[in-house]
Image: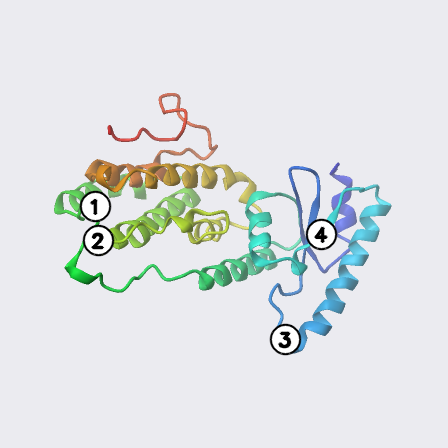
Amino acid sequence: MWNGELASVCRRHPDLVAIYEAPDGGLALLLRQTLVPLHEERGRWFNETRRAARAVVTSLRAAGVTDDVSVLQWRQLADVAAVLTGWLCRYLGDPERCAQLSDIVGARLVDREPSAVSPPRAGGEERLPGAPPISSTLLDWYRDMAPCWLAVEPEVRRRLIIRTHLWIVERVLSPMARGDEPVAADLGPSGRLVWRLVRIVPPGELDVWRAWIRLTITDLQRALAWPAGRRSQAWVRWLFDIPYSIPVTGRRPRDVLAGGSTRAPRR
């Protein structure tokens, strides 16, 4: 069980950037060393991470910690992403280095994703059946709503909303306009949107915003599960409303459906 006294133990180790705790109590160490060493540097990198990890684990054991301890530098990037976004940060010794390492993970995972751009379809097909065009009415609606988006406080929430809107345009509406499906894979635990949002959150505040990110992703997944024939203009407006409707606390308003934070348009 983690306690406040362990923070003083952690501060003795300059190579320890952060410690994350899993729901089952296991711990994961994020060290200062890179997560993606060059091939010619792997020998020295492994020796440095092993030495740093051994020192930290020895101190934690002496302080009474009996939980399993893993080292994020030795795990797959997808596993690291799941820890950074889903586990509780118990100790943050170097917020700046933590943000740098998080950016590296996000950038590498995004680089591995297939492009959302698909070759033109044969036969001149331009749009999936039922896919809504980006009409002038929709553009006018968004412009009318812009003062609401831009007035959101605090600033972090405003930036998260705008970033989500950009993703909707790039990875949902643009593919649909080409006749493709939205890129739903971006909504996975280590997907593109998750990392775009995580990188906006200031170091040390991820625990505050984790619920907001989770609810936004969940509601977007629910929206993208609708069949193509039911994706109307109201459905598109619903997409943009999803991040705007979720409060900072992650609590859902009383008048929403049990399965999501915003009311879906009528089917």
- Helix, strand or loop at label 2? It is helix
- Residue identifier under label 3: 39
Between disc 3 and disc 4, whose residue precedes? 3
Q: CA distance from mark 2 to mark 1?
A: 7 Å
Give the residue type that dot 3 points to. His
Give the residue type that dot 1 points to. Ala
- Helix, strand or loop at label 3? It is helix
Label ID, residue 167: none
- Residue identifier under label 2: 177
Between disc 2 and disc 1, whose residue precedes? 1
Q: Quadrant of the N terminus?
A: top right
Q: Residue 36 at x, y = what percent? A: 60, 66
Left or right of 65, for residue 72: left
- Residue identifier under label 1: 131
Label ID, residue 70: 4
| Closer to us: 60 or 227 | 227
In the rendered image of this protein, does residue 76 appear above or below residue 46?
above
Give the residue type that dot 4 points to. Ser
Q: CA distance from mark 3 to mark 4?
A: 22 Å
Left or right of 155, for residue 92: right
Q: Mark 1 and mark 4 in contact (Cβ < 8 Å)? A: no
In the rendered image of this protein, does residue 93 appear above or below residue 21?
below
Between disc 1 and disc 3, whose residue precedes? 3
| Closer to us: 136 or 6 | 136
